[in-house]
Image (cartoon, coloured by chain):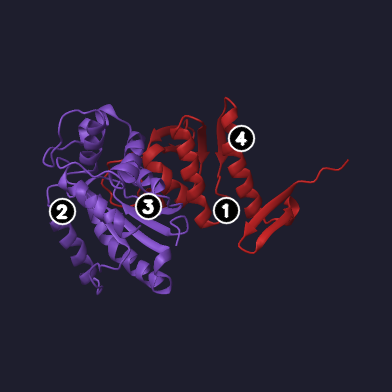
Chain colours: A purple, B red
Amino acid sequence: MSRRRVQLVILCEDVQHRAFAKGLFEARGFRNIRFLPISQGRGAATQYIFEHYPGRVKAYRTMANQNRASHALAVFIDADNRTVENRLRELDGKLEDNGLERRQHDDKIALFIPKMHIETWLVYLIEKATDSKPVDEETPYKDVYRKYYRVRDCIPYAKVFANKICHTDSLPEDAPPSLHRACDELEKIL
Amino acid sequence: MQRILRLSFSDENGEYFYRLSQLSDGQRMLIALYALIYYAQSEACTLCIDEPQSFVTLPEIQPWLMLTEKFCDEGKLQALFISHHPEVIDYLALSSGYSFSRQVHTPTRAERVKKDSNSGLPVSELIASGWFDE
């Protein structure tokens, strides 16, 4: 099925995630995108994702049982001070707490987990484009990004990432490991 | 000479033509909304719409908001919307929303919607609950 017809539902923490997701998925041909409401506040955003993830997975699986190819779910949640593996376990745990199976290989569910934050990826992608200094996953880049860029400035970089870096080129070795995973997650719903 | 405005719809079974008067209020509204954001681009103007979601079905609101936001991001359009609808509030409030409030016999105050109040709820839910922190 054409990606133009896939109904993609996106659960994300904040407007910065949303802007990145918009660039990412539009670049790969998704046209039916539905962003779920974003919660107000930074600290509570992770909890908000945890609370809503099981319900969305349940709804996705119900719809996917009728037509697997036409539905997909993408989730954006920062790893913060946890590891990506921790976040994945936490998300699976939320499913099990609600009587659902963990994420299965054939679920068209992509989990994008930037470490430390989405701004880590954004600063890397922008710095990469300008051949500037390397980026690590331990430094908080939220304030750096907000100082120099607007929320929407990431959209062209997200498009290059989706269309070129993940698609035809390969991500350099020095890229944040969580960003390497993002390419694999993107493949899950293409 | 009479000129007739016809609208063309197509699906896998072919193409269909309708006159504007044959469409529902929602379909006409949708056509007007998309026409506004495309044609306002050529004018040096600010597009102001009160309750743009009126008559439009729920799944049709966000795609229009996304396209409008895209045009605004690209500098092609400037827009100002007033809405009490949760779909519009939740999409726009945290990225570009202002709240308007007024006590009796006082001027109206406009304030940027706070991003970091840590309420953990969508803005529309806070407003509906009367818990919105202005």
Instruction: Assign the N terminus of chain A to one quadrant of the image.
Output: bottom left
The residue wearing badge 2 is A84
- Residue on which the image places disc 4: B39
Total marks shown come to: 4
Task: Give the structural element (helix, strand or loop) at label 2.
Answer: helix
Look at label 4 and name its amino acid.
Tyr
Q: Residue furthest front?
A: A168
Foreground: B132 or A146? A146
* Residue A15 is at least partly visible in this image: no
Decide: few, some or many residues near mark 3? Use Cα within 10 Å; few <14, some 14-19, many ≥20.
many
What is the distance, in whole Å, between disc 2 and disc 3 at their CAs?
Answer: 24 Å
Q: Which one is in front, B41 or A132?
A: A132
Q: CA distance from mark 4 to mark 2?
A: 46 Å
**Splitting the image into 4 quarters, where does residue A36 fall?**
bottom left
Q: Nearer the viewer, mark 1 or mark 2?
A: 2
| Classed neighbour count for the residue bearing mark 4: other residues with Cα under 10 Å, few (<14), some (14–19), many (≥20) | few
Q: Amino acid at mark 2?
A: Val
Residue A37, which numbered label? Answer: 3
Residue density around tag 2, few if under 14, some if 14–19, many if 20 or more, within 10 Å: many
Residue visible at 36% across and 36% down? A156
Pointer 3 indicates a residue of which chain? A
Nearest to N terminus: mark 2 or mark 3: 3
**Residue B107 visible from this viewpoint:** yes
Residue A27 appears at what percent x and percent y? 39, 45
Q: Are marks 3 and 4 on the same chain?
A: no
Marks 1 and 3, how far apart at CA:
19 Å
